[in-house]
Every structure is written in C-alpha cells, then in structure tokens.
Amino acid sequence: MRILTSSVGRKILMSITGQLLIIFVLIHLIGNSTIFFGPNGINAYAKHLHDLPPLVWAFRLFMLAAVSVHICYGVMLTLENKAANPGAYAVKRNLKKSFASENMIWTGVLLAGFIIYHLLQFTVHGTPDIVVGLDAANRVDVFKMVVTSFGHGLISVTYMAAMVMLFLHLSHGIPSFLQTMGWNNEKTIPVYATGGKVISAILMVAYISIPAVILAGLLKL
Ligand code: HEM
C-alpha cells in the first residue's frame, strides 16, 4: 500500500506507467507505418490485430488502467508541488528546468484531449470525417479511413500540433523516468537529457510524416 500513498511510490508508479505508454507509442508508430505499404500494408496489419478480440480487449483495459494511474498521479504531484509541500518531492531533482519540464501538466492535458479525440475518430468511428468500408479483400479499409481523414487540412494540422505536445512531454519524460528509476549518475544526466530530446524528436517527425505525406498528396486512394 505504501507505494500508492508515499510520494516516492507515486512517482515510481508514474514512471512505470509512463514507460508503458512510451512502449505503446513506439509499437503504434511501427504499426501505423504499414500505411506506407498501401492498403495491403495497414489493412492486413489491422486485420491481424482485430482477429484477436480477447487479447485486444485485455490490452485496451491494461492501457486504460496505465493511462488513468499516470494522469491521476501526475495531477496529484503537480498540485503537491504547487502547494510547496516540503515532503512532496522526495525524489531529488537533478534535471535542469526547461519549458518542457515546467509544462508537463499542460502538455499532458493536451495529449489526453488528443487521445480522447483520436479514439472517438479512429476507434469509435464517431467523427464526421470518418469513412468506414471494406477493401477488395473484405478487410476493414483502415487505409481509406486514415487517408480520407488526413486529407482534411485541419485534421492533419491538429495531429501535427498534438505530436509537438508529444515531443515536449517525452523530451522531459524520458530523462525524468530514468532518474526516478535511479538508473543515472552525474555523468549520465546530460546524456539522458540530450537522448530524451533526440528520441522524442524522431518520434515526432515519424508520426508527423503520416499526415504530412497524405496532405502533400504522396499517399492517396
Ligand atoms: C499519425 C498519427 C497516428 C495515426 C495515423 C494513428 C492511427 C490509429 C488508428 C487507425 C487506430 C485504430 C486502430 C484500429 O482499431 O484499427 C488508432 C488507435 C489508437 N491510437 Fe493512434 N494513430 C496516431 C497517433 C497516435 C498517438 C500519438 C497516440 C498516443 C499518444 C495514439 C494512440 C492510440 C490509441 C490509444 C488507440 C486505440 C487502440 C485500440 O483500439 O486498442 N495514436 N490509431
């Protein structure tokens, strides 16, 4: 129980759930990149995923629990820090202050808003831009759905802006989780800070390339 109530315990749980979310972001990017192989890439990939419903639902519930813990404890830590409770930050801060580190709560809130919108759009199919149908091989046509949606400039720009939030959140989140887990020393701190920025920038550019390529008309129906 102490891990849930002590400030160090909560920070560790935030770190572990954050690491799970980073792994998801990496896997999701690899899966999404199959769009560059056309309908036979992403539609086949989505079919493989959807052919395993119990596993898909177990994974979704697990990720929902991880996101919930991450958000709840993130809000609690921010409020505790704001209240300048001297016991609140029992994990020593070695990382330099930056725009990203000072705005974790806001980039996090904007990302949570993006994820809700994204789920409503591509998972629930509840937004007006969504075109759902089957391809020639009778698979859900995820290619057509994504290409049609990203053909709308405003939607693509919204995604690009959300990926900038992801960059900011992870550029501090990555070195921060390494520090929380204690996998650091004086020498590794600057390396982690730079590494965090580089990895986050690669993720941002890779994610942005999907709407950018579609908007540029290089990937079309
Ligand atoms: C260019 C960017 C992205 C594209 C094209 C994309 C595409 C998709 C698609 C097509 C689905 C529905 C999968 C299906 O049910 O067949 C999906 C689901 C999802 N995406 Fe993304 N995504 C992008 C970025 C992101 C980012 C940055 C995050 C997280 C920060 C994210 C989180 C999720 C989640 C949580 C789901 C639900 C997975 C599930 O249904 O179990 N996505 N995405």
Image: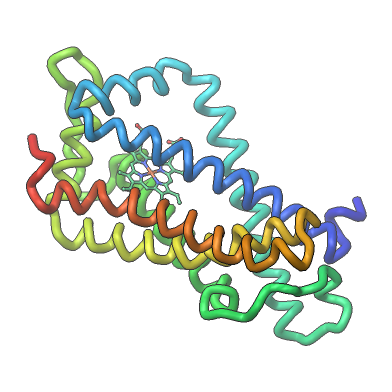
- Identify the residue at horizontal 77%, vertical 67% (top origin): 186
Task: State the image coordinates of residue 184 (x, y, percent, origin top left).
Answer: 76, 58
Foreground pick, 199 / 165: 199
Task: State the image coordinates of residue 7 (x, y, percent, origin top left).
Answer: 83, 66
| Residue 16, placed above or below residue 136 | below
Colour option used: rainbow
Q: Residue furthest front?
A: 187
- Left or right, residue 164 beside residue 88: left
Q: In which image quadrant can residue 147 be found?
A: top left
- Identify the residue at horizontal 48%, vertical 42% (top origin): 26
Q: The C terminus lies in which quarter of the figure? A: top left
Q: In which image quadrant can residue 145 be found?
A: top left
- Left or right, residue 118 beside residue 90: left
- Left or right, residue 159 beside residue 178: left
Foreground pick, 109 / 92: 92
| Residue 188, placed above or below residue 83 | above
Q: Residue furthest right?
A: 2
- Identify the residue at horizontal 53%, vertical 35% (top origin): 60
Q: Residue furthest top?
A: 137
Task: State the image coordinates of residue 116 (x, y, percent, origin top left).
Answer: 42, 53
- Identify the residue at horizontal 68%, vertical 73% (top origin): 95
Where is ligand 1, by quadrant? top left
Task: State the image coordinates of residue 209 (x, y, percent, origin top left).
Answer: 26, 50
Q: In which image quadrant can residue 114 be found?
A: bottom left
